[in-house]
Each structure stands twice: as structure tokens, then as C-alpha cells.
Image: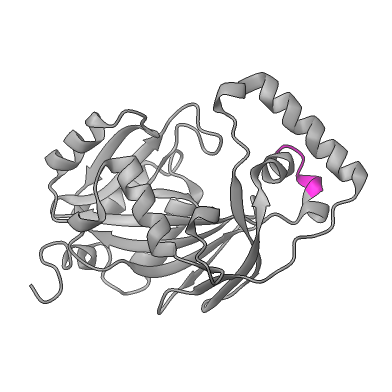
Amino acid sequence: MLNVHLLQSEPKVTLGAAAPTIGPDIEARVNEIWQREKQLRSHELYNGRLFSVDHCDAKTIVGWISEYRYFLAQRREPSLHAALKIKPLAVTGILSCPDGVLFGRRSGRSEMEAGCWELVPSGGVDDAAVGSAGQVSLERCILIELEEETGIGASELSANSRAVALVEDLQSHVTDVGIMLATACSAAQIQRRFAALGNREYSELEIVAPAEVRAFRRNRADSLGAVSAALLDALMQSGSGFPESAFDVAQDKPGA
């Protein structure tokens, strides 16, 4: 089940919550799951550090930094959430270009929603986004994902990023912030950048024309990631003019 909240502005994201105390029995179980996973896919497994949400509303998100292994254990055994309380924060970009909205098919080796289509770019918020005062820059997160997943740099955006929605997945416990992005790069340019990437997170990209987004959403209902589907539905039903309005900012930078 997903809860979607439209945003008027980007929420303030900060560290400020204490991580839960984990007992020795739970810690031992987490280690068992982690060691099993390492044996299965050691070359792909990295115990990174992610932002876990403690409190969240339309204006403020407060949390702490957790190790990825706790979230993985919680995914493998959902009952562990009662003790671990991991609620990862993520970002999902709605990237528009003069030719349409960008979607990608996740690699078959992806941990979550392998083979599914989703809005691009997207990714988790980690400790690299935390500033010296404990504040987290969601814009920095989405720009890093943008360059890693498409090869498009921040200087090639044609408008400022804009947070438009908050999506809470009550099953996976992941909270996503949807962020509108725009670039003047054409579909052909984006595909060339993508093809040149050395380590691609997506098996393919598709740029969907504004008039075709609703049909794309309908035709890919069984293979479209839940968060992307929820974001599209919320924006299209909000009366904001999406997807057409997404392209008004794809032509020129403000003040150009």
C-alpha cells in the first residue's frame, strides 16, 4: 500500500533521531542473513550507509544513518522491522526533455523490482548527502543519480529541480521524494550518453512523448514500479497539467 502526498516545496531533511537499540539476538540474526547473502552474491554486495526515516511529513523529514545490512535483513525477514525500524529515504526523478519523459527498465540483477520499468533517475539517500550541520540535500542526491544513470550532468539541466510528491510504501517501508527535472538534451542525445556508460543500472531507456505517457502507464501496468506508477497517477490526477506542463520548463533556463 502506498500513501502519496503532493508537495508545495522540498521538505527539510536532517539527522536528529536516535537509532533503535538492537539486542544481541536480533544482531546475530542480521549477521546470519548478511553472511548468507554474501555467499550468494559477494561481488555485488556492499554494506553502505543509508538514511532511515524516523519522522516524516510534507515539510520535515528527520532520521538517522543505518547500515544497509539491517535493511537487507529486514527485507528478507519482514518481522525484523519491529526491532530494526529501518525506513530508507529515496529520491525519484521525473525527468523531462523536449521529446518526452524518461523511463528505464531495471537490470535483472537489481535487488529491488528487477526487470521493472521506472522513472529515471532514482536511488537511495546515503550518508554522502549529509552536510556538516546534519542537513541532507535531496537535490545533490538526485543529481548524482542523474549523472550515474544517464550521463547527464547538472549543468545540462534547463530548470531548477522541484520536489513535487512524497510516496510512502507501507510494505517495503521506503519513503520516496519525487523530484521534477528538465533538460534540453534530445532523446537521441540521452540515448547516446546512456550507451556510453560503463556500468549501467538499467538494461534500456525509453523516452515517452507527453501525449503517450497515460498510455504508457496503462500498457505497462504490470511491469511499472509501484512508486513510479503512484507518482504518475498523483501528478496526472492533481490538475497540474502533467505531463504536458513538465515540458514547459524543458526549453529554457529561468531568465534565459
Q: Which residues are magenta?
A: 76-80
The image quarter in which residue 91 lies: bottom left
Q: Specify the farthest residue to the top.
A: 39
> How many marks can you see?
0
- Could you tell me if residue 242 is visible in this image? yes
The answer to whether residue 137 is above or below residue 208 is below
Determine the residue positioned at 20% across, 57% down.
155
Q: Main secondary structure of the magenta part?
A: helix
* Magenta run includes residue 117: no
**Which percent across, then down, holds residue 179?**
37, 63
Q: In this rendered view, identify the residue nearer to me: 127 or 106.
A: 127
In this rendering, is residue 191 above or below 231? Answer: above
Q: Residue at x 25, y 35 (%)?
A: 194
Residue 24 placement, left or right of 161: right
Taking the spot 77% from the left edge, 40% from the top edge, the residue there is 77
Query: Observer-nearest residue: 7 or 21?
Result: 21
